[in-house]
Image: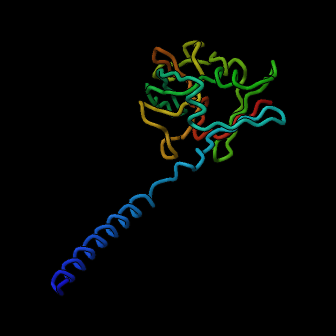
Amino acid sequence: MTEKTSDNKFKNISVVVSVVLIIALGLCGCTSNQPSSTEPEKTLLTVTVGSQSYTYTLTNLTALGDITEQGSYINKAGTVTGPNNYTGVTVSMLLSSIPSLPTNYTFRAIASDDYVRNYTLNEVNGHVALYNDTGAEIGTGNLTMIIAYKENGVLLNETTKGPLRIAFVSTEPSITNSGLWLSSLVKIEII
């Protein structure tokens, strides 16, 4: 073999090795920023009933079935938010997934900042006061209380009062009191 042929083989091997290294490093760089598919999904909600505790990820909640309807609320200053479309699981569906639920209970919702709101069974069943856009009470509605994870088709997050929130929805636009809506829901206690 001549010296020239040997140099060409060496150059070819060097080029191949360089290309392989560049590709390998590129793949490592691309995949190192990707979350591992083996990482468990984040728990978004914990429900406690007595000494029992049940955890729910977004996948668990969506597997219970979903509903998308309209919701609006009015605050103490008279500002109406909505109507917006909220998607989530009905509280009745969530509660039906829990074995041995007591017949008479208080539904306590807790936000990530430790704010606590107790709901009566009437409120859990959607029997809440309705208001017009000027803030006058106009009667009692038969709405659906949901654990919402989407607003207008977009997943809620920490900056949009999520990732979960309690909402009151209906097929028709209905305005409820903002005090019923709980942002940043992380825990429900059935007591």
Q: Quarter of the image holding residue 162?
A: top right
Residue at image coords 46%, 32%: 151
The residue closer to the viewer here, 177 or 172, is: 172
Q: State the image coordinates of residue 117 (x, y, percent, origin top left).
A: 69, 34
Q: State the image coordinates of residue 47 (x, y, percent, origin top left).
A: 72, 35
Residue at image coords 75%, 34%: 189
> Where 24 sits versus 78, above or below?
below
The residue closer to the viewer here, 16 or 61, is: 16
Q: What is the residue that sits farthest to the front in this orientation?
A: 1
Residue at image coords 59%, 31%: 61
Q: Colour scheme of this structure image?
A: rainbow
Q: Quarter of the image holding residue 54?
A: top right
Q: State the image coordinates of residue 139 (x, y, percent, origin top left).
A: 58, 12
The residue closer to the viewer here, 98 or 77, is: 98
Judge left or right: residue 32 versus residue 25. right
For the C terminus, the image quarter is top right
Q: What is the residue that sits farthest to the right in this orientation?
A: 51
Q: State the image coordinates of residue 46 (x, y, percent, origin top left).
A: 69, 38
Number of labels in the image equals: 0
For the N terminus, the image quarter is bottom left
